[in-house]
Image (tube, helix red, strand yellow):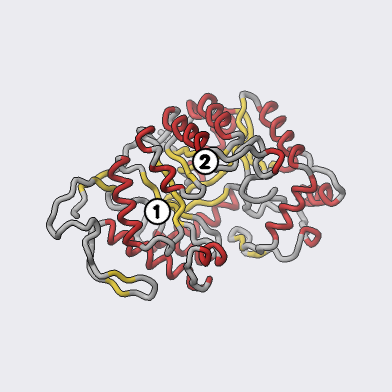
Amino acid sequence: MARPMQVMWYINPNDGPFPWSPKGRIQADLARSREIAVTLDRRGFYGTLTVGRSPLVETASWVPLTEKLRFLIPIYPGVTPPMQLAQHAKLFDSISGGRFLLNQVNGTDSILKSYGVDVPSDERYAMSEEYWTLFKRLYNSDMTPYEGKYFHYSGSPINNLPPGSQSDIWVQDPYTPIWGSGNSPAAIKQAGELLDVYLAHMFRPDRLNVQFEAARTIARQKGRTLGTGVLANIIVRKTEEEAWDHARWVLEQTGVEQIVRQIEQRLKTGRYNPALGTREPGGFEALTSDDPMIKSRLDALRNGRLPDVRALESYPNVWAGPTSWGALDVLEQGWGSYLVGSAQNVAERMREMQEVYGIDAFILAGWPSLEEVNRVADLLLPLLELDTSPPKLQRSTD
């Protein structure tokens, strides 16, 4: 019997038929995001990854409108003190029935400094490890005074009640789960040692598994079990032809100039790819490949043409098209891909990723979001074994 699968949805204030382009974007709307969340809850999705100006505040307003939907909220370690985050998490978990999930985002220097966190980049993971270790202790009401390199606290009661007072708060057992991503060697090490679920942008699953297995190996050495999941765009239709026709339309609407511009911007970061063990220096014109399929993509773009839509299919039903979180993954470096195809074929591919590569969590994104949520719920979800288990709760010891 197949293991239950956690199928989630990505709610982004940037929405539209192709929101990575100004002409394909509609104005951000809090009411629309709320409607999407309510629809996800009623249609059987496990949860939602939500981003925006203040996703913790926004999603808290959705709690009374939903019953089962879990909320995966981005958290930058250090921006919120660990004591305060533990307070927020315990209260959110109690009022929602344990539907809070934390998405660790280690961030970039510019983002952290804008919040007043000035930690050198080579110390960021050490700071993050200390942060989450303290969070877990505080969530479990361990108020032992602590003086560390990055954080400290005196041991005051977390809920401001006198010691020994009983509070009627129910929390997750053993703590609010911590999800996270990152593909550098330091990120992989931290995933194995600390995270509950390790996420990555989906691309060729055989290559992606190199990254996941490295983190799982570290987890096993620590006596831990590590879940894994992917963030993937999706185009699912009744037939393969319909799905690939829409993928072609998305490619055409994005256009050559924007695709090249997005690739150039992405390459400036020189991000490490663990599956290949390399960084990609230089700009778009410096890109080369011995793979005939990849070379044909590069040649087309350099000659002002779009690659054939199926030439971007890096693995059956896995398409390296333009996305809202990066650029067309022309070299299959792990920048993010789509699941494209008929509901039957996409379901088969997801089951393969689960059974062969151990991926149990799928955070999907489709555009426009509400329309694609309903399409996925109508066509795809009935074909999958979905995780409907309730959160595991315990009474707080505060």
Q: Residues within 10 Å of mark 1 (few under 14, many from 20)?
A: many
CB-based contact (under 8 Å), mark 1 and mark 2: no
Quarter that holds the N terminus: top left
Point out residue 364 in the picture as x, y percentages from the top left corner. Answer: 54, 39
Q: Is residue 290 above or below residue 96?
A: below
Quarter that holds the C terminus: bottom left
Point out residue 272 in the picture as x, y percentages from the top left corner. Answer: 61, 63
Q: Is residue 128 above or below residue 51?
A: below
Q: What residue type is labelled 1?
A: Ile
Q: Which amino acid does label 2 sit on?
A: Ile
Point out residue 41 in the picture as x, y percentages from the top left corner. Answer: 42, 32
Q: Is mark 1 on a helix, strand or loop?
A: strand
Residue in the foreground of this view, choosing between 163 and 391: 163
**Residue on which the image places disc 2:** 11
**Residue on which the image places disc 1:** 178
What is the CA distance from the residue labelled 1 to the residue labelled 2?
A: 19 Å
Q: Residues within 10 Å of mark 2 (few under 14, many from 20)?
A: many
Question: Of circles 1 and 2, which is in front?
Answer: 2
